[in-house]
Every structure is written in structure tokens, then in C-alpha cells.
């Protein structure tokens, strides 16, 4: 519920459909008593004051994602201490996080992800996807291919004091921080490091107003684009889709300013992955195809290989087996031609292990409708699992889960249950909503085979994992 998005926003303060405005009066958060309650995180007092403003318990529950019984208990005095619950309440109600001392203050939030746009927050998700596609087309091709872009993605440049002049050392600090934070994301998940990424962005973006040579400024654009891309990825990993979209849009703009085609391709690939995750392969494919244009302009075979592999995934989800297999083949060919030593840093993640992982992933999607594909998925996934070390725990979990799913589809229930148990072992140490979502097919297949003791044990363990 980031950026002031309101659940249940089609209901008015009187409980009738069609409400056009937020049920909380805009000046509610500025009143002295409310500010004092927010500063001390006295949520029961906050809720009582909202009730005085005519906001119902049901509306509070809808906005914060809580049950009405939870809201009732808090109104009676139950304290809220958990950080993630406090942030969910703040974001759901539209409270500036700084008023509660959470993660970053309002000014930083605006600098980093842009001012909250209430109309955009309440748009249908498919409309938001179209808006991003239009923006991506403008950035990549210089023209609005999917319709006119409306609105802005971010506020003006940062107004806080910034260093008077910057040099390469300052930019390298941003790059080094991004590398370190990306490593944490790979190993522990976006939930572990997202706030740190956002804080780093707050500091880094101040330098956009600083003086520096053209070479330094261009490199800064690229460094901040990469950091925004990481912020988008960690937001995606924690389920904050609107925030992810805003960061990726900013990343696109900065990468274009820095004239870096490989990074433009990488950002489009990542946003396409968000849409695959949302089961919107048609929109994902359009982003991958735009990314392919930028990749080919860059002359990077490795970037082209990444985009081809993901296009294959989109086609597999759309049920187009022929195109999926064809693009997998092209991805392998482009990878074989790529000069890995000279590849840009943001595509170096795509190694031979990732080639196997993508082959396995695409065939796993196809295997859901045609079990014959398990014979292609299993060897590729096995190689990927064997190659991932503990630094890539999230990716390893994805592959273990897919591998276990294929073994269950193939009828090897004993081995499938063992591999599935390993997937749960690894997943338990990762803070990632994506991990939970990517393991759903395994849960479904295990539940279907409950008459088998091994599959039943795995299903029970997965149910416990999701309930935790």
C-alpha cells in the first residue's frame, strides 16, 4: 500500500460506492493532537481521532489491510509495535512517514519516488501498466507509441543542500554502495535492504544539483539510474508495485540522460519481469521488445540474450510454445557470442547459470500444460541449482521450487518432495514476497498429490511456511 494507495477506495464515507476523495480530511495529519500521536506512534489515539473525523472502523481496516476486529482492539488501547505494521498503517492511511519517524521523511520520499498522485494510486493496474509502457516507449524511441503520456513520475530536483562540486570519487561512492546493496538483495531479499537503498538514493540525488564536469555528470546519471533500478527491484521484491514502477521510470530517464543503452535495456527487462509476475505477459512482452531495441543499439550480445530469454518466458505464459522455444535458442546463441569480459556491469549478472535457469523456467511454464517439457526443464534446473551458491539464495530458491514442481509433474514424488523441502529451507531465510509467489505452483502440485505421504508432508510444510 505504498504512496498513499487506498484499499477499498470505491466506497464513500457514508459507505456508498463511487467515492472520489480520500475519507481522511487532508488537514487531519496537520492538527497538533494528531501530530503528537503520530510522533509517539500512539496508533489507538490516531484511530480515535480518525473516528472523530467521520472515518469508520471498516474504512480504517480497508485502508490499513487490517481486520475490523484488529482495528477495534487497537481503538481499545492495544499497542502497535511491529515496524512493518506501522509502515503499512502509515502508507495505507496516507500519513507522511516522517511524521512517524519511519524510514525516511516526507521530503526525501518526494525526492526519491515523487509526490503521491491520488488519481494515479486509484487507477486500475492495467491502466498503470499502459502509462508505464507509454513512458518507456517515449524514452526508448522518442515517441509515444502506446498513447500520450500523462502526469509526471517525480517532483523537481532536490532542494536540500548538496555538495558544491563533485568528482569521480563521489560517483564511485554511489556505485560502490549500489554493488554492496545489490549483493544483500540477492542473498537476503529486497525486504532486508530496501530502506537502505532508498536512503542511499536520497543522498545520491542531491548531487544532481552539484557542479561537475560533463563526464562526471554523465556518469552520475548512470550511477543513479542503476540505483533507482535497484530500488525498483527491491520494491518489486517486497510487493510495493507502485513504488517499483516509479523507480523504474526514474531509472529510464536517468539512463537515457547518461546515454546508456544497455542500462535502458536492463531497466525495461526488469519492469517486464514485474508484469510477468503480475500475470500480464502481453504487456511484459512489449517492454521486452522495447528493451530489445535498446539492447541492439548498444551492440551488447549479452543484453540481447537477456531480453530474448525473457521474451521466451512471456510467450510461454501466453501458450505460444513455438515462439518460446525459438527465442530460447536465440538467447543461447547470443550468449555464446557475447564478450563477457567487456560486458556492462548491469548485464554481467547473466551468466551461464542464468541461461540454464531461464531454459528451466520457460520449460517449467510449458510443462504445466504439456508434461513432456519436464525432460528439458529438469536437466537445466539441476545445473542451475548446482551452480548457485549461498550469495544467490533467492535465485536458488526459485530454481529448487521449479525443479521440485517438475519432478512432481513427472511422477517422481519422493524426489520431488525432497527437493521441495530444500526449497522451503532456503526460502525461510529470505525476506521476499516474490519467493512466496514463485513457490505457489509447487504448493498446488503438492496439494494435488495428497494421497502420497511424501507429497502430503511437503504440502503441509508449505502451508506452514505461508502461514508464518
Image: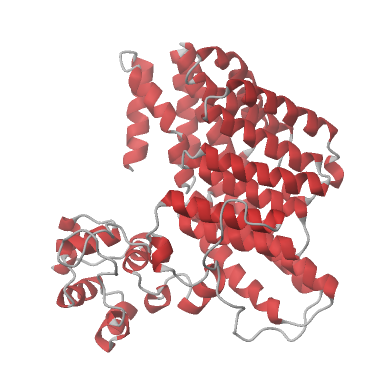
Q: Is residue 453 left or right of residue 186?
A: left
Residue 458 image-quadrant placement: top left
Q: Is residue 358 above or below residue 151?
A: above
| Total number of numbered discs in the rendering | 0
Camera-side residue: 326 or 97? 326
Residue at coordinates 63% horizontally, 36% vertically from top-left?
A: 310
Residue at coordinates 40% horizontally, 65% vertically from top-left?
A: 119
Tell me the quarter of the image containing the C terminus: top left
Q: Is residue 126 visible?
A: yes
Q: Is residue 167 above or below residue 67?
A: below
Q: Is residue 227 left or right of residue 394?
A: right
Residue 136 coordinates in the image, percent (x, y) = 62, 54
Camera-side residue: 68 or 429? 68
Q: Is residue 408 above or below residue 108?
A: above
- The image's colouring method is secondary structure
Residue 62 image-quadrant placement: bottom left
Camera-side residue: 388 or 215? 215
Residue at coordinates 23% horizontally, 64% vertically from top-left?
A: 60
Residue 277 coordinates in the image, percent (x, y) = 49, 41
Residue at coordinates 15% horizontally, 77% vertically from top-left?
A: 52
Tell me the quarter of the image containing the N terminus: bottom left
Q: Which residue is at the far bottom?
A: 32
Q: Is residue 391 visible?
A: no
Residue 91 coordinates in the image, percent (x, y) = 37, 65
Residue 421 coordinates in the image, percent (x, y) = 45, 28
Amino acid at each position: 500500500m505504498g504512496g498513499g494507495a487506498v484499499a477499498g477506495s470505491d466506497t464513500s464515507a457514508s459507505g456508498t460506492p463511487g467515492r472520489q476523495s480520500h475519507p481522511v480530511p487532508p488537514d487531519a495529519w496537520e492538527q497538533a493532537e494528531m501530530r503528537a500521536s503520530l510522533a509517539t506512534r500512539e496508533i489507538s489515539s490516531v484511530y480515535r481521532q480518525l473516528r472523530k473525523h467521520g472515518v469508520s472502523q471498516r474504512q480504517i481496516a480497508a485502508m490499513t489491510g487490517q481486520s475490523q476486529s484488529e482495528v477495534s482492539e487497537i481503538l481499545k488501547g492495544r499497542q502497535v509495535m511491529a515496524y512493518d505494521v506501522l509502515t503499512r498503517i502509515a502508507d495505507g492511511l496516507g500519513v507522511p512517514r516522517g511524521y512517524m519517524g519511519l524510514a525516511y521523511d516526507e521530503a526525501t520520499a518526494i525526492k526519491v519516488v515523487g509526490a503521491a498522485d491520488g488519481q494515479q494510486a486509484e487507477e486500475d493496474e492495467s491502466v498503470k501498466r499502459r502509462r508505464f509502457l507509454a513512458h518507456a516507449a517515449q524514452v526508448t524511441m522518442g515517441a509515444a507509441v502506446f498513447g500520450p503520456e500523462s502526469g509526471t513520475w517525480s517532483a523537481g530536483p532536490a532542494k536540500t543542500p548538496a555538495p558544491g562540486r563533485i568528482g569521480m570519487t563521489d560517483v564511485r561512492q554511489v556505485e560502490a554502495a549500489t554493488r554492496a546493496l545489490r549483493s544483500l538483495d540477492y542473498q537476503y531479499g529486497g525486504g532486508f535492504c530496501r530502506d537502505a537503498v532508498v536512503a542511499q538514493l536520497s543522498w545520491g540525488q542531491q548531487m544532481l544539483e552539484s557542479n561537475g564536469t560533463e563526464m562526471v555528470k554523465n556518469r552520475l546519471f548512470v550511477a543513479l539510474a542503476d540505483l533507482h533500478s535497484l530500488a525498483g527491484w527491491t520494491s518489486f521484491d517486497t510487493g510495493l508495485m507502485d513504488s517499483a514502477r516509479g523507480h523504474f521510470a526514474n531509472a529510464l530517464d536517468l539512463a537515457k540522460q547518461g546515454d546508456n543503452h544497455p542500462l535502458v535495456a536492463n531497466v525495461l527487462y526488469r519492469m517486464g519481469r514485474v508484469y510477468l509476475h503480475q500475470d500480464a505477459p502481453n504487456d511484459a512482452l512489449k517492454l521486452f521488445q522495447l528493451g530489445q531495441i535498446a539492447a541492439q543499439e548498444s551492440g551488447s550480445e549479452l543484453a540481447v540474450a537477456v531480453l530474448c530469454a525473457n521474451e521466451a518466458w512471456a510467450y510461454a505464459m501466453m501458450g505460444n510454445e513455438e515462439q518460446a522455444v525459438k527465442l530460447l535458442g536465440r538467447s543461447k546463441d547470443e550468449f555464446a557470442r557475447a564478450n563477457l569480459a567487456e560486458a556492462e556491469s548491469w548485464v554481467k549478472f547473466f551468466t551461464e547459470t542464468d541461461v540454464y535457469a531461464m531454459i528451466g523456467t520457460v520449460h517449467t511454464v510449458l510443462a504445466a500444460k504439456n508434461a513432456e517439457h519436464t525432460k528439458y526443464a529438469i536437466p537445466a534446473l539441476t545445473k542451475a541449482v548446482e551452480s548457485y551458491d549461498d550469495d544467490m539464495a533467492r535465485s536458488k530458491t526459485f530454481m529448487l521450487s521449479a525443479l521440485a514442481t517438475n519432478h512432481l509433474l513427472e511422477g517422481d514424488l519422493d524426489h520431488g518432495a525432497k527437493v521441495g523441502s530444500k526449497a522451503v529451507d532456503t526460502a525461510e531465510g529470505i525476506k521476499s514476497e516474490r519467493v512466496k509467489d514463485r513457490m505457489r505452483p509447487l504448493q498446488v502440485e503438492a496439494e494435488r498429490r495428497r494421497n502420497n505421504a511424501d507429497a502430503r508432508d511437503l504440502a503441509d510444510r508449505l502451508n506452514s511456511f505461508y502461514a508464518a
